Image (cartoon, grey):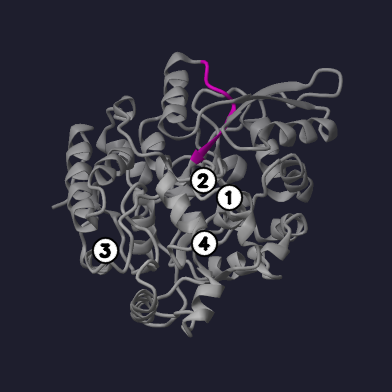
Amino acid sequence: MPSSRPLPSRPLASRPLLSRPLSRLALTASVASLALLATACGAGKEGTGTAAEPVGSADQPVTITYWSSSAGAQQTADAFNKTHPNIRVTFSAVPGGPDGAAKLSNAVKGGNAPDIATMDYSSLPEFASGGNLEDLSATSGTLVAEKFPKAVQSLVALGGRTWAVPFDVTPLELFYRKDIFEKHGVAVPTTWDEYEQAAEKINKADPSVRITNFGGGDPAVLAGLSWQAGAHWYGTEGDRWKVAINDPASRKVASYWNGLLASGLASKTPLWGEGEAKERSSGQVATVIGAAWTAGTFLASYPDLKGKWGIAPLPTWDGKPATGMYGGTSYIVPKGSKHTRAAAEFIAWVTTDPEAVKARLSSLKAPSSALPANPEMRAAAAKLFDTSYFAGQDPYALAGAAADTIVPGWTWGPTHLQVNAAQNAAGADHLKALSEGQSAAEKAITSRGLGLAH
């Protein structure tokens, strides 16, 4: 494989938000709308989904619309239609990231939004507080409570109400070059101290090799590492938002990585560019901090390195298993849908029926290792992944074990798109990314008319 071959785009079903401003989502919201999302608040009235909605029949099916940037979404909708004659799902592909979010926001305002869409977890509080989502408590609340881990429930059940149903769970993991570690007699690190020691030993033996690249380009990695360290970037105090992006736990993470970059042990090459792909394919980096979905990208991007990459748990600060998340996607019902019950039926099928996994994965030209958030769906997905690339390691089993160690209690804030953009502009200075993110969050929350705790 040519060393200059760029990485393919992130898996659309699980990638983090792209990093640029999205002022169209800076919707005015009242303190009352904040209360709906405050995790300390109790539930309000139950969500929509009444018996008055048409349920459809084989002769007169209910037609619902579905928007997503996820690969395999069309095939998933087709498979559903074959087995559910009372409902017909019509699918439309839309852009991912901020462009897709803006399209959806404008569709809600114009009264022509779809009945179902996919959305990054980090966008949910912003959309819900802006009045852009249907409350799914009455239609999907029990499903979320019974089928999904608590660490993921906290991302979709906000303020005592259910606003989305999880698609995937994205625990951070360590991908490492087994051949490089073995050549230099370095053990796979289990702590961040050991990780730095491994970086020093490998780089001393071969100065052309750095431990990884972390030169900006994707603030979601910093968020996930801060999550692992025990940070809580967003919370509430009464009816006000509390922002703690620049907290001690996050600063410890940022200082650690700034130190590795300053010493030359880590590469300043930004994430997700051609430079990154070159470093990884040519053996200039010994590890990759990735998520469950990262495994599938290796098969497509680095086929010549089959058998040389291994997967291990993310190193921790105290040696005890713990991780954060990197990206992740959920299913939502945009505000204004007249078919919330039918939408809930499709969402329940796509997140609980193994046939939905088979339909999605069997249609893909490139491998996918996105880990279903519902543990009952993972076995079906694992059967379709070629484990020989990782010398028999099962990415689904390893990611499933990692998912069990996700630190609970993390929530996203109501203006994280603006935070993401500000942090991305900070480049490779991760301490600056924290301070810029803190300022951007405070400014955006205040400008939306939301209460800010000091």
Residue annotated with mark 3: 261
Q: Nearer the viewer, mark 2 or mark 4?
A: 2
* Mark linked to residue 301: 1
Write the start and end of the magenta stretch as one range. Answer: 112-119
Q: CA distance from mark 3 to mark 2?
A: 22 Å
Nearer the N terminus, badge 4 or badge 3? Answer: 4
Q: Amino acid at mark 1?
A: Ser
Residue annotated with mark 4: 150
- Circles 1 and 2: CB atoms closer than 8 Å: yes
Q: Is residue 197 above or below residue 65?
A: below
SS of the residue under disc 2: loop
Residue 358 horizontal/vertical position (percent): 77, 47
Q: Amino acid at mark 3?
A: Leu
Q: Residue 109: which quarter of the image? A: top left
The answer to whether 8 appears left or right of 284 in the picture is right
Residue annotated with mark 2: 7
The answer to whether 384 appears left or right of 151 in the picture is right
User: Which residue lies at the image location 17% right of the left edge and 39% below the top edge?
Assistant: 443
SS of the residue under disc 1: helix
Q: CA distance from mark 2 to mark 4?
A: 33 Å
Q: Residue 115: which quarter of the image? A: top right
